[in-house]
Amino acid sequence: MNSMKHLFQSIVIGSTLLVTQAWAADLKVEIIGISQAKGDIQVAIFNEQGQWLRKALIGKKVAAVEGKVEVVFENLPEGEYGLSAFHDLNSNGKLDANLIGIPSEPYGFSKDAAGSFGPPSFADAKIKFERTEKTISIRLN
C-alpha cells in the first residue's frame, strides 16, 4: 500500500513538472548596434508596470563585442515583459548619465520603444511571450 502511495505521488509530481516545463520557453535577445568591444552589455527583464526600470525580474551581463551579442533567458514563463539593455562602457554596473540626467552610455528597449522626455512606458516596451522560443532584437542608441 505504501509503495502505491509513493508511485501515485511520483506520477503527480512528474505530471506537474511536465506542465510547468510546457509553460516555459527560451527568450533570445539580440543586442545590436554595439559600437565598440569595451565593457559589458546589461539586459534586464521586467514583468510589472510598477517595477519598470526599478526592479528587474531577471538580468544578465555579457562582455561587449562590436556589432551584436546574444543573451538567452532560459525557461522564462509565458507572460508580458518589458526589456531594457545598455552598454556599460566602464563596467561600473549602472547606466551613466550627464548632469541633467541624459544617459551617456548607449541604451535601448524592447520593441525599440522610446520616450519623449525620459524612458518609454512599460506598455510601450512590453512584449507578449508565449510557450514557444522567441527571438527579439534591441537596438542600442
Image (cartoon, helix red, strand yellow):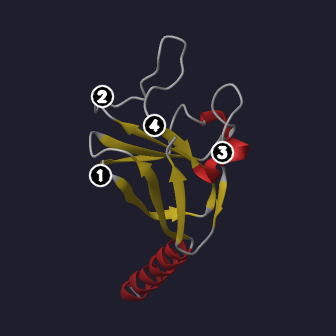
Q: Residue at x 59, y 50 (%)?
A: 110
Q: Mark 2 or mark 4: which is in front?
A: 4
Q: Position of residue 3 (x, y in %)?
A: 36, 87
Q: Position of residue 91 (x, y in %)?
A: 28, 33
Between residue 7 and residue 34, name the one nearer to us: 34
Q: Which residue does the numbered mark 4 point to in the structure image?
A: 106
Between residue 133 and residue 137, name the one nearer to us: 137
Based on the displayed image, in which of its 4 quarters is residue 69 positioned?
A: bottom left
**Given the current orientation, which residue lies at the most extreme top position?**
99
Q: CA distance from mark 2 to mark 4?
A: 14 Å
Q: Give amino acid for label 3.
A: Ala
Q: Which mark is residue 113?
A: 3
Q: Position of residue 41 (x, y in %)?
A: 36, 45
Q: Mark 1 or mark 2: which is in front?
A: 1
Based on the displayed image, in which of its 4 quarters is residue 46 positioned?
A: top right
Q: How many marks?
A: 4
**Given the current orientation, which residue lies at the most extreme front position?**
35
Q: Which mark is residue 92?
A: 2
* Left or right: 74, with 124 as reference point: left
Q: Quadrant of the N terminus?
A: bottom left
Q: Give amino acid for label 1.
A: Val
Q: Reading the chain from its start, which is encountered first: label 3 or label 1?
A: 1
